Image: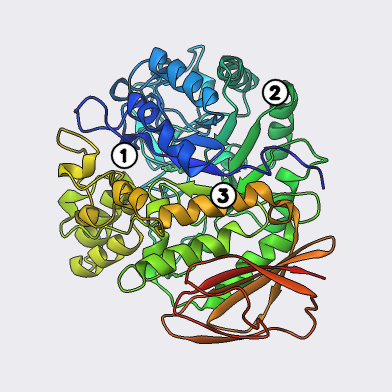
Amino acid sequence: MNKTWWKESVIYQIYPRSFKDSNGDGIGDLKGITQKLDYLKELGINVIWLSPIYKSPNDDNGYDISNYQDIMTEFGTMEDFDQLLQKAHDCGIKIIMDLVVNHTSNEHHWFKESRKSKDNKYRDYYIWKSGVNLQPPNNWESSFNGSAWEYDESTNMYFLHLFSKKQPDLNWENDTVRNEIYKMMKWWLNKGIDGFRMDVINLISKDQMYPDGEIRKGHSLGNFAPYSFNGPRINEFLKEMNKEVLSKYDIVTVGETPKVNIQEAMNYVDEKRNELNMVFQFELMGLGNGNHGKWSNAPFKLTDIKKIMTKWQKGLEDGGWNSLFWNNHDQPRVVSRFGNDKEYWEQSAKMLATCLHMMQGTPFIYQGEEIGMTNVAFKSIEDYRDIETINAYKEQVNIKEKNPLEMMAAINARGRDNARTPVQWDESENAGFTTGKPWIKVNPNYKQINVKSQLEEPNSIFNYYKQLIDIRSKNQIVVYGIYNLILEDNEELYAYTRTLGEEKLLIICNFVDRISKFNLPQSIKYSSQKLIIGNYKISNGVNIKSIEMKPYEARVYLLKC
Ligand code: NOJ
């Protein structure tokens, strides 16, 4: 296995809108991030991933870009960005940017030109099709509800948007589009940024036949996924991007790739293939989805989590590399989802962190996770800001007549705004996020859960994350050790080992709110044991052959053979 800096790093995701507001307009900004670099240095992370900061009308909070080489007005200026990059580098922190090139904003000048006429120079930058019998070209449903095609009067044709109608899809079949994108990527890399997280990058190659999609239960339109994800030319495009751009820099790339299987993911990240370094796959994030996707529930067990995690740990072990995450700006907060955000808030947040950070791959921490931020549960839909949530509510409640209370419960459990409430810095008004009116309400629990109190408390979740990061940085076994699941069928304990040479790590995590008994499999032999980290006070000398694991307890032992 090749050793690289990005395999040995911990990456921290910042959603700038909700991180820290420096000028009182209620919206987080670049200067706010710069102000908090010391905090991130204290935590010990190595890389920041910045969600989009480019010029944008904010239909999808910056994932709709109107100018790739300019900064969103609310976030500041290019000088603010240069300063942030410089200061981060001075602190030994790298910065990777979000690259959103499956689509642009409809306010991007390419699109404004493209829609003007059929012979416009930019026409072919986007995907235009004629309607059929006054209907859209096919039955695809957009990710944010409604048809994925929008009719445009000026030329009497439809354009494709797999997300909102303000996010037209770029036409990657067009060489000029690809070259423009590569040029823009080089411009940022020449500024000194350290890589890219690539938004839905496995959507860029579409099936050129544009067939109708299957109409799944609970939907009235067709599923575009089989004809857009991992499409016919995706690997060719990524290889070209790698050759033209990525290979020329010492950077890290992580592709957001929903709906990938192991083989497809391996094709993207295999060290021998020269495409990407890592992908985000979402198999675990889909756990609990019912008939109506994430807005409905299906029961799941701990063994389901273990199966998925283990499949990916083993699947990419040979020549690939995993990204490790519980959270991001599209997902609910992990302590509310897989932990217990009430009685065992602290223990379960630390247990979940242990379980993930001891695996093989590069861990990603999403802002606020390191202080145990929880889901929010606003009472009214009026308090939500996310386009996906608002559109889904309108469709389910106003059109499909779903019970509004049921829909609110689903939104409170799975909606994206759970992750987007402002970072809770202290117990002052608006959690110290802004002196103005925040663009989205602060989670009312900020008086109990905030950075200030976490920094003061030696046994806090923050200090535990700090320790986990430190352990990884000092122990190659945490980075490169081979993963093996033990106690496969146990529904309470997630236990696994990591092996490197003569050493073994034993990780035991209790996922339930009661005592659970751990019995060490006889196949694990050792001559000495050392407790590396744990979330309860225990002495080192215990007999690890049989342990009563307390509610949400986690322990990591280093065993020598
Ligand atoms: C994935 C991003 O993570 C999400 O926030 C966004 O809405 C879509 N891609 C569209 O860009």
Mark 3 or mark 2: whose residue is earlier in sequence: 2
Residue at image position (50%, 35%) is: 48
Using residue 450 as the reference point, say whether residue 201 is left or right of it. right
- Pick the front one: 510 or 331: 510
Residue at image position (19%, 65%) is: 404
Q: Report how far apart the C-alphas of labels 1 and 2 lie in the structure.
A: 31 Å
Which quadrant would residue 133 be assigned to in this image?
top left
Q: Which kind of residue does numbered mark 1 sit on?
A: Ser
Residue 117 visible to the viewer: no
The residue tagged with tag 3: helix, strand or loop? Answer: helix
Q: Residue 290: x, y in percent?
A: 42, 71
Using residue 544 as the reference point, say whether residue 420 is left or right of it. left
The residue beneath circle 2 is: 249
The residue beneath circle 1 is: 18
Q: Report how far apart the C-alphas of labels 3 and 2 lie in the structure.
A: 26 Å
The residue tagged with tag 1: helix, strand or loop? Answer: helix
Q: Do the residues labelled 1 and 3 touch (CB within 8 Å)?
A: no
- Pick the front one: 338 or 448: 448
Mark 1 or mark 3: whose residue is earlier in sequence: 1
Q: Residue 141 carries which label?
A: none
Using residue 285 as the reference point, say whether residue 358 is left or right of it. right
